[in-house]
Image (cartoon, grey):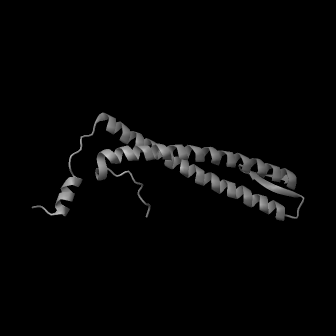
Amino acid sequence: MASPAVIGKSKLNEDVEITQEDQKMINDFANKNSKHNEIKALILSNKKQLQNYEDAGDEIMLNDDESVSVYIGETFFKMSKDEAQAFIDEGKESIEKEIKILAEKAEAYAMELKDLKIKLYAKFGTNINLEEEEDS
């Protein structure tokens, strides 16, 4: 009689027939997972940019001069404190909207990925790994 560990190991490697529909789901999962990761990276980038706008706004408030230099592209421009603050507020508002849109997209992809994971794990069990690898 085989031990439970041996039975478990042989069961892990049992052949599971992969249909064209299964392959389509696996490819769909890979594509959506890639897009989801891209969106998460964009959200992080936008959050850093938002923090930069907030830091710039704080610096303007602390500045005693009537005008400030604003760096746009490769050029510095002189602006009044009010103009610079308005410029920063517009930038912050734009980034916040973008973050909200991206977060909604990320949530939609996460729900689709969850559904695909359930279907794929139901069919393939431990013969398939759909989890993210941790960066070392």
**For residue 62, what is the image quadrant?**
bottom right
Q: Is residue 97 visible?
A: yes
Picture residue at 79% right of the left edge, 62% below the top: 59
Q: Quadrant of the C terminus?
A: bottom left
Instruction: From this view, report whether residue 132 is shown above or below residue 23.
Output: below
Against 64, is 85 above or below?
above
Point 71% across, 49% down: residue? 73
Is residue 80 at least partly visible in the picture?
A: no
Q: Is residue 54 above or below residue 103?
A: below
Residue lying at the far right of the rendered structure: 66
Is residue 64 found left or right of 10 in the rendered image?
Answer: right
Q: Which residue of the protein is positioned furthest toward the top in this rendering?
A: 20
The image quadrant of residue 53 is bottom right
Question: Observer-nearest residue: 4 or 128?
Answer: 4
Q: In x, y percent, where is residue 20?
A: 30, 34
Question: In percent of the image, x 22 and y 52: which residue is there?
Answer: 13
Residue 57 placed where, x, y %? 78, 58
Residue at the image position 59 percent from the left and 54 percent from the top: 44
Viewer-proximal residue, 67 or 4?
4
Front-lying residue, 5 or 86? 5
State which quadrant residue 31 falls in. top left
Q: Position of residue 108 (x, y in %)?
A: 53, 43
**Horizontally, is 81 left or right of 16 in the view?**
right
How many numbered tags mark residues here? Answer: 0
Residue at far left of view:
1
Q: Position of residue 131 (x, y in %)?
A: 40, 54
Q: If the image is split into quadrants, where does the N terminus sit?
A: bottom left
